[in-house]
Image (cartoon, rainbow, N blue to C red):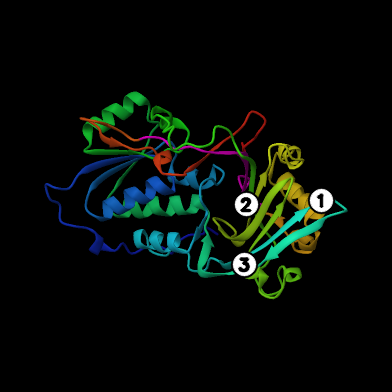
Amino acid sequence: MERGFPHPVPVRLTHLKEKTMSQARIAVIGAGVVGATAALVLARNGHAVDLYSDRTARQLRDDVPATGTAVLFGHSRDVDHTLVEELYPDAPLSTGMNTRLNTGAPGSLEQVLAFDPDFTYTAAGIDVRLRAYDRIRLFEQAGGAFHVATVTPDDLDAIAAAHDLTLVSTGKGGLAGLFPVDESRTVYRAPQRELLAAAFTGLGHGDDVFTARGTGAGKHNVFNLHTDQGEIWIGPYWHKDAGASWSVLGFAKPDGAWVERFDSVTDAQSALDVVVGIYRDYFPDDLPDIEKLRVIEQDPKSWLRGAVTPTVRRASATPAAGIRSPRSATPRSPSIRSPDRARRPD
């Protein structure tokens, strides 16, 4: 069953304004969550918007792993809902962060600290592929033009010349390399962590989840840290196919033992095996719940390995192009690369 908003979706026509000379013709290059959201909001405000992607909406939903920010906390979630209405009312929410820090080797672990604060807000993790797909569909319903084409640097110049404003939202890859790194705001020169991300089903979201951490822990994100190895997080998630599920993010210190484990991941099942092994060896209190996790069979792209280097780039302006702003021009915007030894789902 396809997850998303019901059909048909009513478009709030009150967002559209009568066409005036002051309205711009705008191009958005890149149809991930950021690009699709910008294109949708601009189209709903009456601008003529062309959205370019090298993949169809369906391919963006089903043929790539999930990258980017999935969990929106508090104010970020509220702001997102000022741009696009709530499309996933059944998504499980998290209301706190249950955190523990361990040290020591497997078999001789020691807990350094533990805390479990409630948020003063709610957080929701929504599959970014689903968010992009649904926003593209809403964009087309709002009158926007969606173009499936690979945009080269030469194409970018031509597109910029034909539009009043051109926004580049392609992440670190692709056209983002055309924009210079802002050295004054880019602190890191190498990845600080190796990354393993995956989504799993099989574990519920009721009061019987993560009971080793206390009553109500299943409604919180569960965050484990190890002084020498890194961090691993699991939280409620809304997957594009499976609906209510769990997202796991593992961050391995470059010189720690978890890196070799991450390197062994080649598919969703091996990702699950590594996750279970880390909890068994380093966070055994949570193991009974983690062992209930299962691979999402409908989605072979449910996992991702890579590394994170926060990079800030500068926007550029030309008389013809207006402003061309890459996604990575946002302050503290992490970009994902695949290191030489890393793999993404084929």
Residue 166 in the image: state x and y as whole percent: 29, 37
Q: Earlier in the sequence, mark 1 or mark 2?
A: 1
Q: Position of residue 12 (x, y in %)?
A: 29, 64
Q: Amino acid at mark 3?
A: His
Query: The residue tagged with tag 3: helix, strand or loop?
Result: loop
For the residues bearing labels 1 and 3, Cβ distance under 8 angstroms: no
Give the vertical position of 63 relative to 101 (above or below). above
Q: Which residue is mark 2?
A: 298
At a point 79% along the width and 53% down the height, the residue shown is 282
Work out which residue is located at the far top of the displayed protein and give it.
Answer: 154
Indicate which disc, 1 or 3, sits on the residue closer to the N terminus.
1
> Range of the magenta residues?
296-314
Q: Nearer the viewer, residue 264 or 256?
A: 256
The residue pinned by badge 3 equals: 220
Q: Residue at x 29, y 27 (%)?
A: 157
**Helix, strand or loop status at disc 2:** loop
Give yes or no for residue 304 being in the magenta stretch.
yes
| Label 1 neighbour load within 10 Å: few <14, some 14-19, many 20+ | some
Q: Which sits in the foreground, 16 or 112?
A: 112
Q: Mark 2 or mark 3, which is nearer the start of the sequence?
A: 3
The spot of residue 11 in percent (x, y) is 31, 62
